[in-house]
Amino acid sequence: MMKILVSDPIHTEGIEILRKAGYEVHENFDLSKDQLKNIIKDYDAIIIRSKTKMTKEIIEAGINLKVIGRAGVGLDNVDKEFAETKGIKVINTPDVSTTSVAELVMGYIISIARHIPQATESLKKGEFEKEKFSGIELAGKTIGIIGTGRIGTAVAKRAKCFEMNVIGYDPYVKYSDTIKMVDFETLLKESDVITVHVPLTDITRHMISNDEIKKMKKGVILVNAARGGIIDEEAVKKGLEDETIGGIALDVFESEKPFRSVLTAYDNFVGTPHTGAQTEEAQKRAGIEVAKKVLEQLNKMKR
Ligand code: NAD
Protein backbone atom coordinates (compact mmCIF):
# COMPACT_ATOMS: atom_id res chain seq x y z
CA MET A 1 0.00 0.00 0.00
CA MET A 2 1.30 3.45 -0.90
CA LYS A 3 2.13 5.70 2.04
CA ILE A 4 1.66 9.43 2.42
CA LEU A 5 3.32 11.51 5.14
CA VAL A 6 1.52 14.67 6.24
CA SER A 7 4.22 16.61 8.08
CA ASP A 8 2.37 19.93 8.60
CA PRO A 9 -1.30 20.05 9.65
CA ILE A 10 -3.91 20.20 6.88
CA HIS A 11 -7.71 20.20 7.13
CA THR A 12 -9.22 16.86 8.22
CA GLU A 13 -11.31 16.65 5.03
CA GLY A 14 -8.06 16.47 3.04
CA ILE A 15 -6.85 13.57 5.21
CA GLU A 16 -10.21 11.81 4.73
CA ILE A 17 -9.93 12.07 0.94
CA LEU A 18 -6.51 10.39 1.01
CA ARG A 19 -7.62 7.58 3.35
CA LYS A 20 -10.83 6.91 1.39
CA ALA A 21 -8.68 6.52 -1.75
CA GLY A 22 -6.94 3.63 0.00
CA TYR A 23 -3.65 5.24 0.98
CA GLU A 24 -1.91 4.78 4.33
CA VAL A 25 -1.67 8.28 5.77
CA HIS A 26 0.64 9.21 8.64
CA GLU A 27 0.22 12.62 10.29
CA ASN A 28 3.50 13.40 11.98
CA PHE A 29 4.13 17.05 12.80
CA ASP A 30 7.12 18.88 14.31
CA LEU A 31 9.65 16.36 13.04
CA SER A 32 13.27 17.43 13.39
CA LYS A 33 15.39 17.54 10.24
CA ASP A 34 17.10 14.26 11.22
CA GLN A 35 13.83 12.52 12.07
CA LEU A 36 12.36 13.50 8.71
CA LYS A 37 15.55 12.39 6.93
CA ASN A 38 15.30 8.96 8.60
CA ILE A 39 11.65 8.25 7.79
CA ILE A 40 11.15 9.90 4.40
CA LYS A 41 12.39 6.79 2.52
CA ASP A 42 9.19 4.96 3.57
CA TYR A 43 6.85 7.38 1.79
CA ASP A 44 5.54 7.80 -1.75
CA ALA A 45 4.29 11.34 -1.13
CA ILE A 46 4.67 14.08 1.46
CA ILE A 47 2.20 16.88 2.17
CA ILE A 48 3.57 20.03 3.76
CA ARG A 49 2.68 23.65 4.44
CA SER A 50 5.35 26.29 5.07
CA LYS A 51 7.09 24.69 8.07
CA THR A 52 8.62 21.50 6.67
CA LYS A 53 11.79 22.25 4.71
CA MET A 54 12.21 20.01 1.66
CA THR A 55 15.93 20.58 1.16
CA LYS A 56 18.24 18.68 -1.22
CA GLU A 57 19.31 16.46 1.68
CA ILE A 58 15.74 15.43 2.57
CA ILE A 59 14.73 14.96 -1.07
CA GLU A 60 17.83 12.81 -1.66
CA ALA A 61 16.83 10.61 1.30
CA GLY A 62 13.29 10.21 -0.10
CA ILE A 63 14.18 7.30 -2.35
CA ASN A 64 10.52 6.32 -2.88
CA LEU A 65 9.16 9.85 -3.06
CA LYS A 66 7.03 10.63 -6.09
CA VAL A 67 5.09 13.76 -5.08
CA ILE A 68 5.63 16.76 -2.80
CA GLY A 69 2.32 18.54 -2.14
CA ARG A 70 2.36 22.03 -0.66
CA ALA A 71 -0.97 23.16 0.82
CA GLY A 72 -0.80 26.88 0.00
CA VAL A 73 1.10 29.04 -2.41
CA GLY A 74 4.77 29.68 -1.55
CA LEU A 75 7.37 27.11 -2.55
CA ASP A 76 10.22 28.90 -0.75
CA ASN A 77 10.64 25.81 1.49
CA VAL A 78 10.96 23.33 -1.37
CA ASP A 79 14.00 22.80 -3.61
CA LYS A 80 11.67 22.34 -6.57
CA GLU A 81 14.38 22.28 -9.21
CA PHE A 82 16.29 19.50 -7.45
CA ALA A 83 13.11 17.51 -6.76
CA GLU A 84 12.23 17.63 -10.44
CA THR A 85 15.67 16.36 -11.47
CA LYS A 86 14.83 13.31 -9.32
CA GLY A 87 11.51 12.87 -11.15
CA ILE A 88 9.50 14.06 -8.13
CA LYS A 89 6.45 16.14 -8.97
CA VAL A 90 5.98 19.30 -6.86
CA ILE A 91 2.45 20.66 -6.65
CA ASN A 92 0.87 23.54 -4.71
CA THR A 93 -2.57 25.16 -4.38
CA PRO A 94 -2.22 28.77 -5.56
CA ASP A 95 -5.97 29.45 -6.02
CA VAL A 96 -7.33 28.63 -2.59
CA SER A 97 -6.59 31.88 -0.75
CA THR A 98 -7.57 34.43 -3.43
CA THR A 99 -10.91 35.41 -1.84
CA SER A 100 -9.48 35.53 1.69
CA VAL A 101 -6.61 37.83 0.71
CA ALA A 102 -8.86 40.08 -1.39
CA GLU A 103 -11.31 40.46 1.52
CA LEU A 104 -8.45 41.32 3.90
CA VAL A 105 -7.25 44.00 1.48
CA MET A 106 -10.72 45.60 1.44
CA GLY A 107 -10.71 45.46 5.24
CA TYR A 108 -7.39 47.31 5.34
CA ILE A 109 -8.52 50.03 2.97
CA ILE A 110 -11.71 50.70 4.93
CA SER A 111 -9.81 50.52 8.24
CA ILE A 112 -7.41 53.24 7.11
CA ALA A 113 -10.04 55.40 5.40
CA ARG A 114 -12.19 55.39 8.56
CA HIS A 115 -9.47 54.95 11.26
CA ILE A 116 -11.28 51.91 12.66
CA PRO A 117 -8.33 50.38 14.62
CA GLN A 118 -7.31 53.75 16.08
CA ALA A 119 -10.89 54.69 17.01
CA THR A 120 -11.37 51.29 18.66
CA GLU A 121 -8.20 51.81 20.73
CA SER A 122 -9.44 55.25 21.75
CA LEU A 123 -12.88 53.92 22.81
CA LYS A 124 -11.17 51.20 24.84
CA LYS A 125 -9.38 53.97 26.77
CA GLY A 126 -12.80 55.49 27.59
CA GLU A 127 -12.41 58.38 25.13
CA PHE A 128 -15.15 59.56 22.71
CA GLU A 129 -13.34 61.75 20.18
CA LYS A 130 -15.72 62.03 17.23
CA GLU A 131 -13.91 64.81 15.31
CA LYS A 132 -10.48 63.20 15.61
CA PHE A 133 -11.63 60.19 13.59
CA SER A 134 -13.13 61.97 10.62
CA GLY A 135 -12.34 59.89 7.50
CA ILE A 136 -12.83 59.69 3.73
CA GLU A 137 -15.24 57.80 1.47
CA LEU A 138 -13.97 55.24 -1.03
CA ALA A 139 -16.68 55.93 -3.64
CA GLY A 140 -15.22 57.98 -6.50
CA LYS A 141 -11.61 57.38 -5.39
CA THR A 142 -9.10 55.62 -7.63
CA ILE A 143 -7.50 52.34 -6.64
CA GLY A 144 -4.31 51.32 -8.45
CA ILE A 145 -3.66 47.60 -8.54
CA ILE A 146 -0.09 46.51 -9.26
CA GLY A 147 -0.20 42.91 -10.52
CA THR A 148 -3.58 42.00 -11.97
CA GLY A 149 -3.49 38.22 -11.53
CA ARG A 150 -5.81 36.19 -9.33
CA ILE A 151 -5.79 38.35 -6.18
CA GLY A 152 -5.39 41.70 -7.98
CA THR A 153 -8.48 40.93 -10.06
CA ALA A 154 -10.45 39.76 -7.00
CA VAL A 155 -9.61 43.06 -5.26
CA ALA A 156 -10.68 44.97 -8.39
CA LYS A 157 -14.13 43.31 -8.39
CA ARG A 158 -14.67 44.19 -4.74
CA ALA A 159 -13.39 47.77 -5.17
CA LYS A 160 -15.92 48.26 -8.00
CA CYS A 161 -18.74 47.36 -5.59
CA PHE A 162 -17.48 50.25 -3.48
CA GLU A 163 -17.84 52.49 -6.56
CA MET A 164 -14.08 53.03 -6.87
CA ASN A 165 -12.35 53.69 -10.22
CA VAL A 166 -10.09 50.75 -10.82
CA ILE A 167 -6.81 51.04 -12.70
CA GLY A 168 -4.04 48.46 -12.91
CA TYR A 169 -0.46 47.91 -14.01
CA ASP A 170 0.88 44.53 -15.06
CA PRO A 171 3.47 44.21 -17.85
CA TYR A 172 2.14 40.72 -18.66
CA VAL A 173 -1.54 41.65 -18.94
CA LYS A 174 -2.59 43.81 -21.89
CA TYR A 175 -6.33 43.77 -21.35
CA SER A 176 -8.75 43.09 -18.51
CA ASP A 177 -12.57 43.13 -18.43
CA THR A 178 -12.55 44.52 -14.89
CA ILE A 179 -9.52 46.80 -14.77
CA LYS A 180 -8.41 49.77 -16.89
CA MET A 181 -4.77 48.90 -17.64
CA VAL A 182 -2.35 51.84 -17.45
CA ASP A 183 1.43 52.31 -17.29
CA PHE A 184 3.28 52.28 -13.98
CA GLU A 185 3.81 56.09 -13.87
CA THR A 186 0.11 56.80 -14.48
CA LEU A 187 -0.87 54.38 -11.73
CA LEU A 188 1.49 56.05 -9.26
CA LYS A 189 0.24 59.56 -10.13
CA GLU A 190 -3.52 58.89 -10.29
CA SER A 191 -4.23 56.47 -7.44
CA ASP A 192 -5.69 57.36 -4.05
CA VAL A 193 -5.07 53.78 -2.94
CA ILE A 194 -2.26 51.55 -4.23
CA THR A 195 -2.19 47.82 -3.54
CA VAL A 196 0.49 45.37 -4.73
CA HIS A 197 -0.30 41.81 -5.83
CA VAL A 198 2.88 40.67 -7.56
CA PRO A 199 5.32 37.88 -6.70
CA LEU A 200 8.56 38.89 -4.98
CA THR A 201 11.31 38.81 -7.63
CA ASP A 202 14.50 40.78 -8.33
CA ILE A 203 12.32 43.15 -10.40
CA THR A 204 9.52 43.62 -7.86
CA ARG A 205 11.73 43.92 -4.74
CA HIS A 206 11.36 47.55 -3.58
CA MET A 207 9.32 48.40 -6.70
CA ILE A 208 7.67 50.94 -4.39
CA SER A 209 10.51 53.00 -2.91
CA ASN A 210 11.50 56.67 -2.51
CA ASP A 211 11.28 57.66 -6.21
CA GLU A 212 7.88 56.02 -6.68
CA ILE A 213 6.46 57.49 -3.45
CA LYS A 214 7.52 60.98 -4.58
CA LYS A 215 5.25 60.62 -7.63
CA MET A 216 2.17 59.62 -5.62
CA LYS A 217 -0.79 61.76 -4.57
CA LYS A 218 -0.49 63.34 -1.13
CA GLY A 219 -2.33 61.19 1.40
CA VAL A 220 -2.16 57.97 -0.67
CA ILE A 221 -3.06 54.71 1.10
CA LEU A 222 -0.60 51.85 0.45
CA VAL A 223 -1.33 48.15 0.92
CA ASN A 224 0.94 45.10 0.70
CA ALA A 225 -0.65 41.70 1.29
CA ALA A 226 1.61 39.99 -1.28
CA ARG A 227 5.19 39.48 -0.06
CA GLY A 228 7.38 41.49 2.31
CA GLY A 229 9.93 43.66 0.51
CA ILE A 230 7.85 44.66 -2.51
CA ILE A 231 7.21 47.96 -0.72
CA ASP A 232 10.37 49.45 0.83
CA GLU A 233 9.50 49.96 4.52
CA GLU A 234 12.23 52.58 5.12
CA ALA A 235 10.89 54.62 2.18
CA VAL A 236 7.34 54.35 3.58
CA LYS A 237 8.63 55.62 6.93
CA LYS A 238 9.90 58.79 5.16
CA GLY A 239 6.61 59.09 3.28
CA LEU A 240 4.61 58.88 6.51
CA GLU A 241 6.82 61.49 8.14
CA ASP A 242 6.51 64.02 5.30
CA GLU A 243 2.79 63.09 5.01
CA THR A 244 2.95 61.98 1.36
CA ILE A 245 1.53 58.69 2.60
CA GLY A 246 -1.78 58.84 4.44
CA GLY A 247 -1.75 55.25 5.66
CA ILE A 248 0.05 51.94 5.23
CA ALA A 249 -1.39 48.46 5.66
CA LEU A 250 0.85 45.41 5.69
CA ASP A 251 0.15 41.71 6.05
CA VAL A 252 3.71 40.85 5.01
CA PHE A 253 6.99 42.30 6.17
CA GLU A 254 10.64 42.54 5.16
CA SER A 255 11.51 40.72 8.41
CA GLU A 256 8.80 38.33 9.64
CA LYS A 257 10.84 35.82 11.62
CA PRO A 258 12.07 37.55 13.70
CA PHE A 259 9.39 40.20 13.26
CA ARG A 260 10.75 43.72 12.91
CA SER A 261 9.26 46.75 11.23
CA VAL A 262 10.03 50.45 11.49
CA LEU A 263 6.37 51.14 10.66
CA THR A 264 4.54 49.76 13.70
CA ALA A 265 5.40 52.95 15.63
CA TYR A 266 3.22 55.06 13.31
CA ASP A 267 -0.38 55.86 14.10
CA ASN A 268 -1.56 55.33 10.51
CA PHE A 269 -0.08 51.85 10.24
CA VAL A 270 -2.48 48.89 10.16
CA GLY A 271 -1.16 45.37 10.07
CA THR A 272 -1.66 41.65 10.50
CA PRO A 273 0.92 38.86 10.97
CA HIS A 274 0.73 37.29 7.47
CA THR A 275 -2.87 36.18 7.99
CA GLY A 276 -4.00 36.68 4.38
CA ALA A 277 -4.83 32.99 3.92
CA GLN A 278 -5.75 32.32 7.55
CA THR A 279 -9.47 31.76 7.21
CA GLU A 280 -11.49 28.63 7.84
CA GLU A 281 -12.53 28.50 4.19
CA ALA A 282 -9.07 28.98 2.68
CA GLN A 283 -7.50 26.39 4.99
CA LYS A 284 -10.21 23.86 4.23
CA ARG A 285 -9.91 24.48 0.50
CA ALA A 286 -6.11 24.10 0.72
CA GLY A 287 -6.39 20.74 2.52
CA ILE A 288 -8.92 19.35 0.07
CA GLU A 289 -7.16 20.63 -3.03
CA VAL A 290 -3.68 19.45 -2.04
CA ALA A 291 -5.09 15.98 -1.27
CA LYS A 292 -6.85 15.78 -4.64
CA LYS A 293 -3.79 16.98 -6.56
CA VAL A 294 -1.44 14.55 -4.78
CA LEU A 295 -3.84 11.66 -5.52
CA GLU A 296 -4.07 12.69 -9.16
CA GLN A 297 -0.27 12.55 -9.48
CA LEU A 298 0.07 9.23 -7.63
CA ASN A 299 -2.68 7.68 -9.76
CA LYS A 300 -0.94 8.84 -12.95
CA MET A 301 2.27 7.20 -11.79
CA LYS A 302 0.53 3.91 -10.95
CA ARG A 303 -0.58 3.48 -14.54
P1 NAD B 1 -0.82 35.65 -9.70
O1 NAD B 1 0.34 34.90 -10.26
O2 NAD B 1 -2.20 35.22 -10.08
O3 NAD B 1 -0.67 37.21 -10.08
C1 NAD B 1 0.53 37.90 -10.01
C2 NAD B 1 0.52 38.94 -11.11
O4 NAD B 1 1.69 39.76 -10.96
C3 NAD B 1 0.59 38.33 -12.53
O5 NAD B 1 -0.51 38.77 -13.30
C4 NAD B 1 1.90 38.85 -13.09
O6 NAD B 1 1.83 39.12 -14.47
C5 NAD B 1 2.09 40.13 -12.28
N1 NAD B 1 3.47 40.62 -12.25
C6 NAD B 1 4.63 39.93 -12.23
N2 NAD B 1 5.66 40.78 -12.23
C7 NAD B 1 5.14 42.03 -12.24
C8 NAD B 1 5.71 43.34 -12.24
N3 NAD B 1 7.04 43.52 -12.26
N4 NAD B 1 4.88 44.40 -12.23
C9 NAD B 1 3.54 44.24 -12.21
N5 NAD B 1 2.94 43.02 -12.26
C10 NAD B 1 3.74 41.94 -12.26
O7 NAD B 1 -0.62 35.63 -8.13
P2 NAD B 1 -1.75 35.83 -6.99
O8 NAD B 1 -2.31 34.51 -6.62
O9 NAD B 1 -2.64 36.93 -7.38
O10 NAD B 1 -0.82 36.29 -5.77
C11 NAD B 1 -0.26 37.59 -5.72
C12 NAD B 1 0.68 37.72 -4.53
O11 NAD B 1 -0.02 37.45 -3.31
C13 NAD B 1 1.88 36.74 -4.54
O12 NAD B 1 3.02 37.45 -4.12
C14 NAD B 1 1.51 35.73 -3.48
O13 NAD B 1 2.66 35.13 -2.92
C15 NAD B 1 0.78 36.61 -2.49
N6 NAD B 1 -0.10 35.90 -1.54
C16 NAD B 1 -0.09 36.33 -0.24
C17 NAD B 1 -0.90 35.68 0.70
C18 NAD B 1 -0.93 36.14 2.12
O14 NAD B 1 -1.09 35.32 3.01
N7 NAD B 1 -0.82 37.43 2.39
C19 NAD B 1 -1.70 34.60 0.30
C20 NAD B 1 -1.70 34.21 -1.05
C21 NAD B 1 -0.89 34.87 -1.96
Image (cartoon, rainbow, N blue to C red):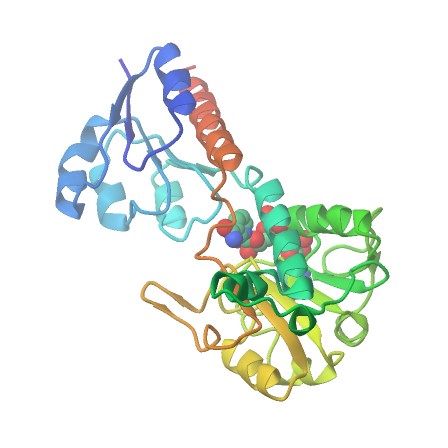
Please indicate whether residue 259 sits to the left or right of residue 106 in the image: left
Q: Residue at x 50, y 69 (%)?
A: 229
Instruction: Indicate the position of residue 38 as horizontal and vertical percent values.
Output: 13, 37
Instruction: Indicate the position of residue 234 as horizontal and vertical percent values.
Output: 50, 81
Please indicate whether residue 194 sits to the left or right of residue 239 in the image: right
Instruction: Indicate the position of residue 277 as horizontal and vertical percent values.
Output: 50, 45
From the viewer's side, name the closer residue of 100 and 2.
Answer: 100
From the viewer's side, name the closer residue of 182 and 267.
Answer: 267
- Image height check: is 141 above or below 155? below
Quadrant (top left, top right, bottom left, bottom right) of the N terminus: top left
All told, the count of numbered labels is 0
Q: Residue at x 73, y 82 (%)?
A: 215
Please identify the residue farthest to the bottom as the structure is shown.
242
From the viewer's side, name the closer residue of 237 and 9.
Answer: 237
Q: Residue at x 59, y 66 (%)?
A: 128
Instruction: Indicate the position of residue 102 as horizontal and vertical percent values.
Output: 63, 48
Q: Please identify the quarter of the rendering in which residue 169 is found.
A: bottom right
Observer able to see residue 191: yes
Quadrant (top left, top right, bottom left, bottom right) of the C terminus: top left
- Image height check: is 19 above or below 88? above
Please indicate whether residue 125 sits to the left or right of residue 137 in the image: left
- Image height check: is 167 above or below 236? above
Q: Please identify the quarter of the rendering in which residue 139 is found.
A: bottom right
Q: Quadrant of ligand 1?
A: bottom right
Please indicate whether residue 299 sits to the left or right of residue 131 in the image: left
Observer able to see residue 201: no
